Amino acid sequence: MRYYETVFIVRQDVTSSQVETMTQHFTALVKEHGGEVTKTEFCGLRALAYPIKKNKKGHYVLLNIACPFKGIAEMERQMKLNEDILRFLSVRVEALDNNPSALMQRNYREDSNYSSFNDSEFEGETPPNRPAQQQAY
């Protein structure tokens, strides 16, 4: 059995429950073809790098799949026909990673009050010496 990571982006005006329903549909489709979805990540509504079909945001979903190629081919065929899906990408991988994806780790850092340092720790200290800036004539 081969391993795949599939990411798809759903239009911004689709509700989260509809995205979940789509994901369940694709999971059932993979199971029909003798595979299984080992991990599903809803990365949420995120801004796109550029507008796609007049959409500036999209719901990102990541699926880790162990399935024969026929199951992936059918899933991709149905994704092409679905007008709510803006883009999708399936990549074959050597092994499935069950750790949180880079998108989810980024979401966690943005949501928490993460700070690389606390300013109160450095009160009274002078900043390190920096080279003097050249003046323009």
Image (tube, rainbow, N blue to C red):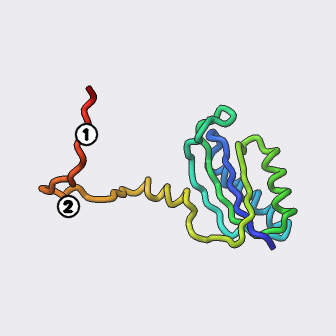
In this rendering, the label closer to the viewer, 1 or 2: 1
Q: Residue visible at 84% across and 51% down? A: 77
Label annotation for residue 115: none
Give how far across and how far down residue 30 sits, in percent.
Answer: 80, 64
Question: Farthest residue in the left direction?
Answer: 124
As displayed, is residue 51 above or below residue 101?
A: above
Quarter of the figure with residue 98: bottom right
- Answer left or right for 90 relative to 46: right
Q: Residue visible at 63% across and 39% down? A: 13
**SS of the residue under disc 2:** helix
Q: Which of 134 and 14 is in front in this view?
A: 134
Q: Residue visible at 80% across and 46% down? A: 80
Please give the residue where the numbered disc 2 appears in the rendered image. Answer: 121
Assign the N terminus to one quadrant of the image: bottom right
Give how far across and how far down residue 15 sits, in percent.
Answer: 63, 45
Give how far across and how far down residue 85 sits, in percent.
Answer: 72, 45
As displayed, is residue 3 above or below residue 58?
A: below
**SS of the residue under disc 1:** loop
Give how far across and how far down residue 128 sits, in percent.
Answer: 21, 54
Assign the C terminus to one quadrant of the image: top left
- Give the alpha-carbon distance from disc 1 to disc 2, as whole Å: 28 Å
Quarter of the figure with residue 121: bottom left
Label annotation for residue 133: 1
Q: Mark 2 is on which residue type?
A: Glu
